[in-house]
Amino acid sequence: MNAKLRLGPLPKTESVKITIVLSARLKVDLDRYSELHAQTWGTPVDTAALIPHMLEVFIARDRGFRVALKSR
């Protein structure tokens, strides 16, 4: 299966640990996404490792956020 995922291969980055609380439904979806990501890119990945990269992609593509940053 070759799905078109928005999230590409994960880069190596420096990290800072934080704790978040997710709904059970979101955790299930994230686990499914992780499985599909591993199938697509051929590298197993822990669900928790995907979350920071998903947030980076989300923020990078949020036009409203970019506009707000420029107007500061």
Image (spheres, grey):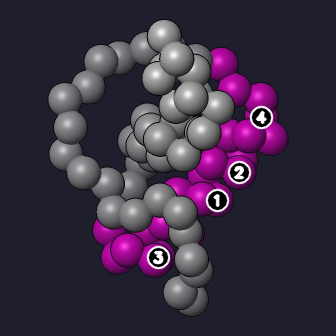
- Compared with residue 38, is residue 26 higher up or lower down, i.e. above or below? above
Q: Is residue 37 above or below residue 20?
A: below
Provide the residue designation for mark 1: 32
Indicate the amino acid at tag 3. Gln
**Left or right: residue 64 compared with residue 45:** right
Residue 44 appears in the picture as rendered = no
Residue 64 image offset from top left, x and y in percent: 64, 32
The alpha-carbon separation of the residues under discs 3 and 1 comes to 11 Å
Please say if 67 is above or below 17: below
For label 2, the SS is helix
Residue 60, image x and y in percent? 47, 41
Dot 3 alpha-carbon crowd within 10 angstroms: few under 14, some 14 to 19, many 20 or more:
some
Earlier sequence position, callout 3 versus callout 2: 2
Q: Name the residue under label 3.
A: 39
Residue 9, quarter of picture: bottom left
Q: Which of 72 and 26 is in front in this view?
A: 72
Magenta range: 21-43
Residue marked by disc 2: 29
Q: Residue 24 carries which label?
A: 4
Q: Would you call the spot at circle 1 few (<14 residues within 10 Å), some (14-19), or many (20 or more)?
A: few
* Side of 65 where 23 appears, left or right: right
- The reply to whether discs 2 and 1 touch (Cβ–Cβ < 8 Å) is yes
Which image quarter: residue 33? bottom right
**Residues at marks 3 and 2, CA–CA distance in whole angstroms:** 15 Å
CB atoms of marks 4 and 1 within 8 Å: no
Decide: marks 3, 1 in contact (CB < 8 A)? no
